[in-house]
Amino acid sequence: MEWLLTPGPVRLHPKALEALARPQLHHRTEPAREVFLKARDLLKKAFQTQGEVLVLTGSGTLAMEALVHNLFSPGERVLVPVYGKFSERFAEIAESAGLAVDRWELPYGEVPSPEGVARPGYRGLLLVHSETSTGALVDLPALAKAFKEANPEGLVGADMVTSLLVREVALEAWGVDAAASGSQKGLMCPPGLGFVALSPTALEALRPRGYYYDLSRELKAQGEGESAWTPAINLVGAVAAVLEEVVPRLPEHLALKAWQNGLLYQVGEELGLRPVPKVASPAVAAFYLPEGIPYRAVKEAFAQRGAVIAGGQGPLKGKIFRLSLMGHYQRYEAFGVAALFKEAFADILPTS
Ligand code: PLP
């Protein structure tokens, strides 16, 4: 079996595999309702919200789109700093929802500053917490605070797709009103579920929109442990099983993820590789390719050792490579990955 060193989908948690092997549940029965409510309850703990978390069948992008469409109306002004592929996607979603979008374009790898978002006249600010395409992490609490000082009625929406269960997140305490995430990253489950977390403020601000992703309709159905439509209930079972294991020991889990990603950067530094982000997210380690080395060669050196890695996206395509231990990796396995990384580069880099 190959080692997935990709930033999603990731190596599955054994509890997810176990849950996925169970017989099919019908989604409108009591055992399914129990699983659904358990997953939602644990997700609220993971997002640290007193509001609600809705589970949608679809990927993280659906959760981002549902968040934007159900919190903002066409014509409303939103500020979207663009500093990677997924913040770019947030801007595109907001544009397609008919919002008046002000993009603040930054070079890929950088992150927005609080001063830069302290601009009045906006209904919303959309931010990606962990910008997986560059490996950068933004200071969400500082940005939300600066934005809200300038826009007391404004709402902050965050993409927490690769920060949920990878790094601490806290909705209300951070001034974040709504967040989107997905099942195939820090949750160590297969792809197929999107999550929308709504703070009490966001719940009051909901404006029903769309059909499949009408969050008001979902709120009603999911309060009773069901979903308006047929949910991917098997995946909901996997999510509940993983969260049951991880949430009670979240601080240790987050410390392991931080240490593992730090180890990847440490090896990169030893090999003389230049990191892409200025402020690193623990979800992924991103490095520029050494001069004259094509991505294909790096990918191949890892593949020969049974590992799958990721390349660059957008303007970083062909310029960087990315490794991630966001999936289920024990501490000792991370040492194995570090050794593999060194060995692969011993092949790639010409000896001096
Ligand atoms: N946002 C971030 C930060 C991501 O890393 C990803 C996926 O890589 C997405 C959004 C999109 O999620 P999905 O591919 O599940 O739609």
Image (spheres, grey):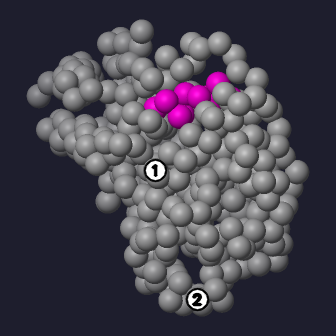
Numbered circle sitting on residue 101: none
Residue at figure coordinates x 49%, y 30% from the top left: 241
> Which residue lies at the image location 53% right of the left edge and 34% below the top edge?
240
Residue lying furthest right: 211
Secondary element at tag 1: helix
Q: How far apart, in angstroms, are the residues tagged by discs 1 and 2?
A: 27 Å
- Pick the quarter of the image with the N terminus: top left
Q: Nearer the viewer, residue 274 or 153?
A: 153
Q: Nearer the viewer, residue 137 or 322?
A: 137
Question: Disc 1 beta carbon < 8 A from ligand 1?
Answer: no
Q: Which mark is residue 152?
A: 2
Q: Position of residue 234 (x, y in %)?
A: 64, 24
The secondary structure that dominates the magenta segment is: helix
| Residue that badge 1 annotates | 46
- Magenta stretch, residue numbers: 233-242
**Residue 20: in magenta span:** no
Q: From where the camera sits, is residue 51 visible?
A: yes
Q: Is 240 within the magenta?
A: yes
Residue 153, image x, y percentages: 64, 86
